[in-house]
Image: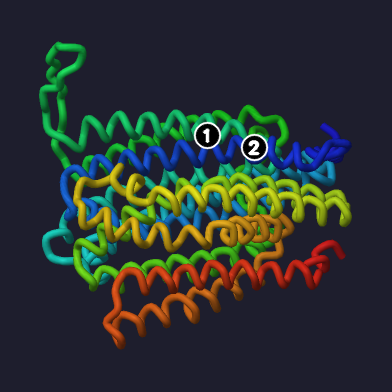
Amino acid sequence: MSSKQQPASLYQGKNLTAVVLALAWPTIVEQIFQTVVQYVDSAMVGRIGANASAAVGVTSTAMWLMNSFSFAVGVGFLACISRAAGAGEIRQARTISAQAVLVSLAVGIITGSAGVLVSGSLPRWLGAEAEICGPASAYFAILCGALIFRCPVIVFGSVLRAAGDMRTPMYVNAVTNLVNMVFNFLLIYPSRTVELLGRSFEIWGAGLGVAGAAWGTAIAFVVGFVLMVFAVCRNHLISPIGFPLKPNLEILLRVWKITLPNIMQRLVLCLGQISFTALITGLGTIPLAAHSIAITAEQAFYMPGSGFQAAATTLSGQALGAGDKDKLKKIISTAGRISVIVLACTGFLLFLFPSVIMSVFTPDLEVIARGAEVLRLVSISEPFFGLTMVLEGAFNGMGDTKPSFYISLFTMWCLRILPAYICVKVFGLGLVAIWWCMVADVISRSMLLLARYLRGRWLKALK
């Protein structure tokens, strides 16, 4: 195989809007699958009671922290592989892919082991009430134990997207989510009789409650791992087969320089989310349940932004590899414009129907009322979040990850956590005031990233 081939450009001679939409829709569908499963998980657990919802919610931000390392590593490999593909260096892209195999397994083992070790104490550290600490610890430990499979799924998904393959991660996600729902149905509830078309059927169930939801997700991680390994090995642009599975320090250092600021950014955001949840935990079980369900519900309305982010990341990396500065600018502006318009529409729907959305997850009228109030509030920030996702995605694709870290550090801790702490601890305010702080964080981060883009300082990545 020649070390250099024609650039693997996804946009050459094509309408950029069409290209962005074509790359975005598989990721959007993938996010829909994930959100449906989260909806089903929350609805199934919510039927057990508010305590069960709170047990899942109290460690959800800590689980984001565990996963953040995998996503950050994925960003590093995506930037390097998409740049190599854009420059036509296909052999180099496959060499980098082989390094992704090693790193993803190592990160999965390390983060999973750390999570299991702290699982027994984590809910108590976060201020959870005594009755939910046990289920919350078990839920977190089971999910962390499966991270050795989850991490490669995340990283391999980024590797495939770097080569322009957005559909395979979507298909894999669809299968794993279906597996998750089936096992949740069987493991959460005890054996029971159901009526269907006038006939009675006995359905087996393990009756594991909150732990059953975790085991269903863990089994799905294993299935996703097997499918994703098969998919990566079949892709001729990034298959690691035939390339040495031993550390390449030059490549690892290049990936690390991109990954480290992204890890720091995700740590800042996740630790901020954990601190944010801890403040809400102190308000009681009902506000915590309302917050947890509202966070899950909101994801459906900003998930199109993930698709446009993925498109911006891949296209920006390839444009950088090809040295095409004009195309790079057009990619960012096109993806950003589409994302803002789409998320403004989804935010409007969130504003109109918050109570209906909350009622999908819980029959508790007080939880519904509290959650609907904050969902209507956060709807105003959706278009800003859409812009943030595209700008961060583009900067990530170019490997320019430091500014996003500094901006996130400032907005999360100075505009969200500190004001939220003052609202709760000094003025005794409740859930709505805390969510106002979250909205301020989102809008401010968007405006700061936009200011950096308009100043053009990011163009130094092309030099």
Res 145 seen here: no
Q: Mark 1: few, some, or many residues within 10 Å (few <14, many ≥20)?
A: many
**Mark closer to the chain start, 2 or 1:** 1
Is residue 378 shown left or right of residue 363? right
Mark in the foreground, 2 or 1: 1
> Residue 93 at what x, y percent from top left?
73, 43
In the rendered image, the quadrant that contains the C terminus is bottom right
Which residue corresponds to mark 1? 228
Q: Nearer the viewer, residue 154 or 434?
A: 434
> Residue 191 at what x, y percent from top left?
11, 28
User: Looking at the image, is 214 positioned above or below residue 177?
Assistant: below
Res 325 seen here: yes
Where disc 1 sits, the SS reads helix
At 35% across and 81% down in the image, what residue appears?
Answer: 423
Q: Mark 2: few, some, or many residues within 10 Å (few <14, many ≥20)?
A: many
> Residue 187 at what x, y percent from top left?
21, 34
Q: Nearer the viewer, residue 247 or 126?
A: 126
At 12% across and 33% down in the image, what residue appears?
Answer: 190
> Residue 306 at what x, y percent from top left?
57, 48
Where disc 2 sits, the SS reads loop
Which image quadrant for residue 422?
bottom left
At 35% across and 61% down in the image, what residue appears?
Answer: 373
Amino acid carrying label 2: it is: Pro
User: Looking at the image, is 297 positioned above or below residue 434?
Assistant: above
Amino acid carrying label 1: it is: Met
User: Looking at the image, is 424 positioned above or below residue 95?
Assistant: below
Which residue corresponds to mark 2? 240
